[in-house]
Image (cartoon, grey):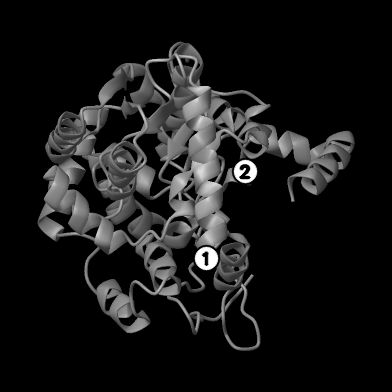
Amino acid sequence: MIEEYRICSKCVMDTTDMDITFNEEGVCNHCVNYDLQMSRLPQGGERDNQLKLIVDKIRNNGKGNEYDCIIGLSGGVDSTYVAYYVKKILGLRPLAVHLDNGWNSELSVMNIENIVKTLDIDLFTYVMDWEEFKDIQLSFLKCSTPDSEIPTDHAIFTILRKISKKYKVDYVINGINLKTEGHHPLSWSQGHIDFGYIKSVHKLFGSKKIKTFPHGNIFTIFEDRLSSKWVNILNYIDYNKEEAKKLITSELGWRDYGGKHFESIYTRFYQGYILPKKFNIDKRKMHFSSLICAGEMTREKALEYLKEETYPKELQIEDREYAIKKFGITDQEFEEIMNRPVKSYFDYDSYYGKLLKSKSVKKLIQLLKRFIK
């Protein structure tokens, strides 16, 4: 574990990531991995050819169906641009899927309505059972790991799979991309596809039964990597986030939230208030670092931004009061949660943890890695 403070000489990732390492030039492991992964992505004509092959497969596979692909739609930059690109540029017939976990901002609702109306895309919205989901979210706050967004992320991917099966549409297109999202410290969040983790945390800290929460199983850990029909479409184009913002603003009337994933009030509060204050984690560092490596932001500008508040203090106070009221807890209970000792994913039972302890599964994982590479 790094004891003295250091910051990457290339990006703005630093030793607030307890697992970070640096090479002789002072470049962090995240930048090294970013460059390696980017070098493996197709470029130029090869990239265009691969995209054409994928689109042709989606069209052929979707013949006779009302939709030929599923897209996740949060109302954020990436998912909004995917909706525009898939419908307007590629000419596909997507069904947009949105998960309402009870924390949508008014602006996100308005953006989503404008997007689907302007693009003439059908929208399927899955509304979570709030009392059940509230209990799960509170469990994650009480367990004291930096993973309180895990239940939402897990539910989103589960719903996308279920809707894909329901409508017999094999291809799910999403906005996950390496270029602007390539820095992701595991010490800052992990366990997104691990329902075993969610289940064990809820068992310890929850009070209700999980009846309707959308979830995967132990096989989900391998499912996404083994499936060739989960398409990260932005990896096949020359994606530029600022240019994407300008386009969706002018073409779709999209309005900015002021931060990555801030379309959700809870995400805004969690990433902008709880993570920095309780865990000393500022996720802007990983977001800015990817943009620096992508050539979309200078390191100097990122360092300037990081001197500013994560988001306006007045709004932080409003969000804090709103979250406490929505969770049905007192100010004192919230402060008690904030003051609990910090834990990690590995302090709780999980499917992945069980797999790591299994000798036979260790051998299987090594075999699978050989085929996946």
Image coords of residue 373 (percent x, y): 74, 51
Quadrant in the rendering for residue 186: bottom right
Image vertical order of residue 157 relative to residue 242, above or below: above
> Looking at the image, is 33 positioned above or below residue 328?
below
Residue 112: percent from the left, percent from the top?
20, 34
Q: Amino acid at mark 2?
A: Asp
Residue 288 visible in the picture:
yes
Crowding at mark 1 (Cα within 10 Å: few <14, some 14-19, many 20+): some
Horizontally, residue 130 falls left or right of residue 368, namely left
Q: CA distance from mark 2 to mark 1?
A: 18 Å
Within-10-Å neighbours for mark 2: few <14, some 14–19, many 20+: few
Q: Residue 308 appears at what percent x and percent y?
A: 22, 71
To which residue does mark 2 refer?
A: 347
**Front position in the image: 240 or 151:** 240
Report the front residue among 21 and 273. Answer: 21
Dot 2 falls on a residue whose secondary structure is: helix
Specify whether 40 is left or right of 85: right
| Figure quadrant of the N terminus | bottom right
**Residue type, numbered disc 1:** Asp
- According to the picture, the residue beneath numbered tag 1 turns out to be 17
The count of marks equals: 2
The disc placed on residue 171 is none
Q: Position of residue 284 (x, y in %)?
A: 35, 63
